[in-house]
Amino acid sequence: MVSPSLTGLAGVRPFLAGMFVDALGSGLYVPLTLLFIHEVTGLPMTAVGLGVTVAAVVGLAANPVAGILIDRFDARRVLVGTYLLRALAFAAYPFVDGIAALIVVAALVAVGDRAYYPASGGYVSALADGTVRDRLYTLVATARNVAFGLGGLLSAGVISLAGVTGFAVVALLNAASFTVAALCLLRSGRPAPAAPSRQPVGYRQVLADRPFVTLVAAEQAYTLIHMVLPVALPVYAVTVLDVPPALMGVLYAINTVLVAAGQVPVRRWQRHSRRTRAMALSGLVMMLACAAYAATAALPAGPARVGGLLAATLVLTLGELLHTVPSWALAAAAAPPALRGRYLAIYQQTWAVAAVLAPAGFAALLGAAPPLLWLALAVLVGLAALTLLRLTHRLPADAVAAPGA
């Protein structure tokens, strides 16, 4: 249900419906990414890994290009384009028969995924501002997490019932979900365009905004922490802590459910906190999560370690909840409307960088000495939290202000 304060905004209901359907389809695929591609294409796992890595590198260029397109046209059109691009790619997956075709299709998915984030953030920013924008970000995060969790459950059901054929069904269902999301968005209202800038526009102007660039650098630490659950934890838990791999699915489900259920109450709790301070607090909680993961290795094997992992994951989940909405809202409000696409593209590039750095970086630190990973992440996010506190008086006052002020 849309909040009463949002009901007057054109396009909110179709937009949220599209977000939900999109995340439902993605939930079918994301938890099984490499296995999905291997089963659908029949290619060896080494070729799949290479293709996905090359595609991720190609996807790095999508954010800056999306920022230019958003500022030149509008976020809604670019967002529709990301849906259609990924619909085409997933429909093509069952026809991939070689590494070259895999790289092309996976690159289309990566480009659509990376361009989606500045486009969706830009569209929310164009629809609403102030407290209403924070509420809309909260609804988007809630809807996507609920749908993503449901998609994961549906994926398990489809594959259990259809076997290997189920992976092809997942590909087609995901393609259909992106198509439906695009149709929903086309029904939504088109926000009024931002006033044209009187200054020369371009990424040079964004990079000259030192407070914002510093904010981006701090955000990079947070995005690396967000990669812990899908990337670092499975390796750490199985190879270092010697716990059953099946536990990872349980922890992932708990995280997804709590993030979905906790967005609204956490946003209400944060409504009188400056966004920089709310993000700094999330950094402190994430530091505690890193310490808890490291300490779990000192617990006796068996139920004690399982309990330690669960406790650490709950703390990490709280940190994610405290970080997500203030982060999105702060970046959107700090950007000049005429350059919002470029600003958000640079901000969201932190996720693309994390997706490239995390697998190899986390593996290297775990291989050298597992505590090094948690120490490095804790130091990085601690420095990021201090940086955010120092940025409180350097970023635009309305961007930093408490959403309930």
Image (spheres, rainbow, N blue to C red):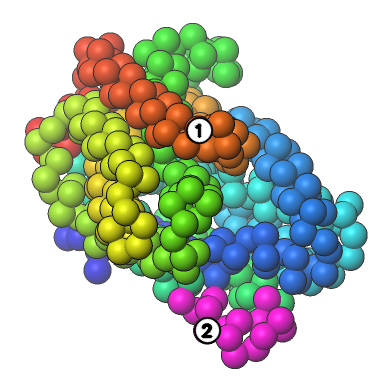
Instruction: Please report the residue visible at 55 percent of the width from the left and 70 percent of the height from the top.
Output: 28
Per the image, is 163 magenta? yes
Amino acid beneath label 2: Gly
Image position of 68 with respect to 43: above or below = above
Q: List x then y, in percent, for residue 397.
A: 21, 19
The crowd level at tag 1 (other Cα within 10 Å; few <14, some 14-19, many 20+) is: few
Per the image, is 71 magenta? no
- In the image, the segment drawn in magenta is 153-167
- Name the residue at the bottom extreme: 161
Can you identify the residue that label 2 sits on?
157
The front one of 200 and 25 is 25
Amino acid beneath label 1: Ala
> Which label is found at residue 223?
none
Can you identify the residue that label 1 sits on?
369
Please, what secondary structure does the residue beneath circle 2 have? helix
Magenta highlight: main SS: helix
Q: List x then y, in percent, for residue 150.
A: 42, 73
The front one of 124 and 391 is 391
Quadrant location of the N terminus? bottom left
The crowd level at tag 2 (other Cα within 10 Å; few <14, some 14-19, many 20+) is: some
